[in-house]
Amino acid sequence: MNNKYKILVVEDEENINNLITTLLDANGYQALSAKSCADARIMNSSYKPDLVILDLGLPDADGGIFLKEVRKGSRVPIIVLSARSDEKDKVEALDSGANDYVTKPFGAAELVARVRSALRTSIYTGDNAGYSGERFETGDLSIDYDSRHVFIEKNEINLTQTEYNIIAFLSKHPGKVLTYAAIIKEIWGYSDLGSIKKLQVNMANIRKKFGAIPGEKNYIINELGVGYRMNNDE
């Protein structure tokens, strides 16, 4: 069974299409290729991709038309990849339902990071069946993935979007130690010199909101120098 994310690349310039599909394959995704709006419609209907990378300047129709068609019945993440750099083009694409807009020429590492970010957002907003309709519970802690709400003893905990994403990620691997690097990659899609500090600050805020008490067994366990894990021993 192939569990790779399927990404549809809609790009008529063959060299760019080949570059993107090769890049995606190298990063563990299953790349699908289309070079026109007509091809994109067929591929989208047949394969139900997890994400679409869409050029606007297609030979048979404007990519914006395909974008609007898809949005009528799907929330699949769509990243527009276009040579059009005018602000009005970006605004129009985003208003039509694009999740992100990348202008050509583009950096390979940046594009992959944008893909990770769009897929991550899709998962945590319930677009992915792996989270939709599910709840996580341990002790008095409860997470409703569809509504993105977290409760302790039936009291809702007010988390920021980043704090929620961290909690949701940890809860999907209860009892497993997730390294700092793994969490940073999942939540932000990139690493920089301040990444660990940024994670630690968010985690400190989460534990404070959860009412964590030092020295006691709490919902989130800090494995010093390694990472964090969601406690499921309750």
Image (cartoon, grey):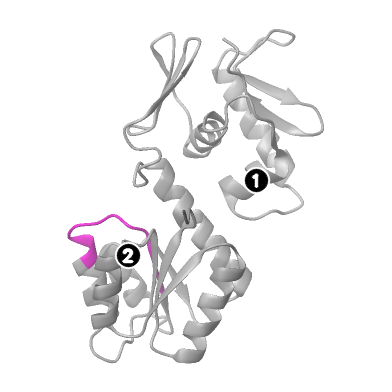
Residue that carries the numbered disc 1 in the rendered image:
184
The residue closer to the viewer here, 2 or 68, is 2
Res 46 label: none
Under circle 2, the secondary element is: helix
Task: Specify which label sits upstream in the sequence, 2 or 1.
Answer: 2
How would you rate the neighbour count of disc 2 (Cα within 10 Å): few for under 14, some for 14-19, many for 20 or more? few
In the image, taking residue 20 as reference, residue 51 lies left or right, namely left
> Residue 128: x, y in percent?
37, 46
Task: Answer above or below: position of 74 versus 213.
Answer: below
Disc 1 on helix, strand or loop? helix
Query: Is residue 33 in the magenta section?
Result: no
Q: Name the amino acid type tagged 1.
A: Ile
The residue under label 2 is 47
Quadrant in which residue 227 is drawn: top right
Gap in Å between the C-alphas at discs 2 and 1? 30 Å
User: In this image, 27 relative to 45: left or right?
Assistant: right
Q: Is residue 42 above or below residue 186?
A: below
Q: Measured from the top left, where is residue 191 in percent x and y?
A: 69, 53
Instruction: Establish if 49 lies above or below 134.
Output: below
Query: Where does the magenta region start and end?
Result: 70-80
